[in-house]
Image (spheres, helix red, strand yellow):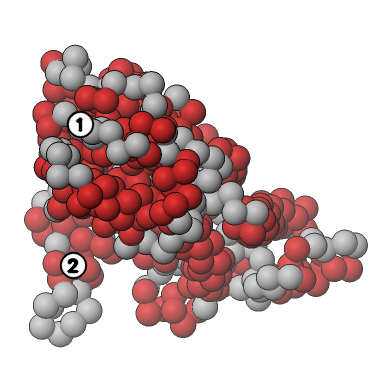
Amino acid sequence: MLKVLLRNASPMIRLGANVGPSSFIRSVMSRPSLNLRNISALSKTSQCLISRQNSYRALSSCSILKQATTAVKKQPAKKLINSSKQVGYWLIGTSGLVFGIVVLGGLTRLTESGLSITEWKPVAGTLPPMNEQQWLEEFAKYRESPEFQQLNSHINLDEFKFIYFMEWVHRLWGRAIGAVFVLPAIYFAVAKKTSPRVNRRVFTLASLLGLQGFIGWWMVKSGLDQEALNERKSKPTVSQYRLTTHLTTAFLLYLGMLWTGFEILKEAKWVKDPAKALSQIAKLDNPALGPFRKTSLGLLALTFVTAMSGGMVAGLDAGLIYNTFPHMGDDWIPSKRELFDNNFARKDDASDLFWRNMLENPATVQLNHRILAMTTFCAVFGMHMWVNRRKHILPKNAVRSMHAMMGVVTLQATLGIFTLLYLVPISLGSLHQAGAMALLTNALIFAAQLRKARIPMRILVGGLSTRAAPKATSKILTEAGNVAAK
Ligand code: HEM
């Protein structure tokens, strides 16, 4: 391998001229067969050169290089560093399908269709009832359910067909996402279009997708079982905990696909234009960006928690009370007695009073969502001002994302308020849910745009940028060394 590398390297290096390790790396890595084995061998080769030539002066930058390559070497050799662009487009396309199913799931809930299919048949359930006889059989099963008996006893077969159709399309869409995700994932892995890092992520996402099917049924079951409903002292609706778990998994899937997709496309762009990549990577290495990077992740987490608290509001139908804003009823907030109502405690000593009210009392759950939503709005507002003040040090696309996020959070808060004031009409409820996903997308893009380049990427781009200024390359490798040392 050493011989091959030396043969591949530029003649100047082969002659042992006094060149820095970055030029050597660039020269070798500009060859097409670029993988981690080459990089590992590269490190050995550069060490070898150093020991042979005492005149070699760039020891400090070499130790940085060694640290960086050691970090790279920890991964299995002979593997791709960056995945194909197609994989990035596929992941972003699939995340679009997840966006669609979340909105459809919201519509299914808002039209109260979610409990219309009383069985879970992963394969046979792909087909809807095909004739009148089958429809009557499905309707008969529904008539046995608590929802029909306590809330929907007035509906006829045609109305049943509508709610059944909503739930069936939701389940079918879920199956379609499974196929659109898993089959191409296998193809990309077999065709070696994905790096091991992306393979691991895709595997996690595929597992989460499978789990989501189970969670969906586990959620529906909570609304069909009369005993469970009695225990919760609830009308026939699904448990707010299970609804929020279903929503959380959907959001995690969506964000995971989007994050990985964006990362792949960004890195593909860097590989395509290494000279430009060097300046972008150097800009992202600016230490002044550190606090922005951390805050962007905090903002993403805060938006996520706010969205989850919205799921609890939706699960408890807590948007049907206190339909005023900014006041809740006659005051800013309801009384303490109402927010921490003894009726929600289940233990004799009432030791569960606090958390049960926080998660099960509709008034408290709505107040929590209001507080989190306003905190999110103020946090984005503050971040927007901060970004505007320091925009000269931030990448231009991140500044643009922040402007967009300010607009989306304003729209989302306004939609939330109108959803509440108008007692959750289907249109506003659904738009508010889509708005939450749009806000999360924006927060994710902003955080992704501020992320530093990972070490193998730095080495790869440094190697490819044969025409780039050596100073910039060595700066990037220095940073790689710093990260590796940490
Ligand atoms: C600014 C950030 C906000 C985010 C990220 C957010 C997110 C969400 C989410 C994800 C849901 C669940 C939707 C569903 O599953 O159908 C929800 C529900 C809800 N949100 Fe918000 N929300 C925000 C602001 C607000 C505000 C300011 C209000 C009003 C004061 C509000 C009122 C509601 C109501 C009433 C529901 C229940 C709707 C239903 O039953 O379908 N939201 N929110």
Say whether residue 388 is left or right of residue 256. left
Q: Is residue 45 above or below residue 349?
A: above
Three-letter residue code for mark 1: Lys
Q: Residue 62 location in percent, x, y?
A: 19, 44
73 or 400: nearer the eye? 73
Tell which residue pokes out farthest to the bottom in this image.
348
Q: Residue 135 location in percent, x, y?
A: 82, 64
Disc with the residue nearer the chain's start (1 vs 2):
2
Is any part of residue 323 visible from this angle? Answer: no
Tell me the tag on residue 355. 2
Three-letter residue code for mark 2: Trp
Queried on whether the Cβ of the residue with tag 2 lies below 8 angstroms from ligand 1, the answer reads no
Q: Is residue 223 above or below residue 52?
A: below
Query: Image point 48% across, 50% down: which residue?
Result: 4
Tell me the tag on residue 402. none
Is any part of residue 50 visible from this angle? Answer: yes
Circle 2 — which element?
A: helix
Between circles 1 and 2, the one closer to the viewer is 1
Query: Image point 26% across, 62% down: which residue?
Result: 359
Q: Residue 412 location in percent, x, y?
A: 35, 31
Query: Image point 14% across, 53% down: which residue?
Result: 486
Say whether residue 251 is left or right of residue 409. right
Query: Image point 80% across, 72% down: which residue?
Result: 137
Residue ID for mark 1: 475
| Circles 1 and 2 in contact, beta carbons < 8 Å | no
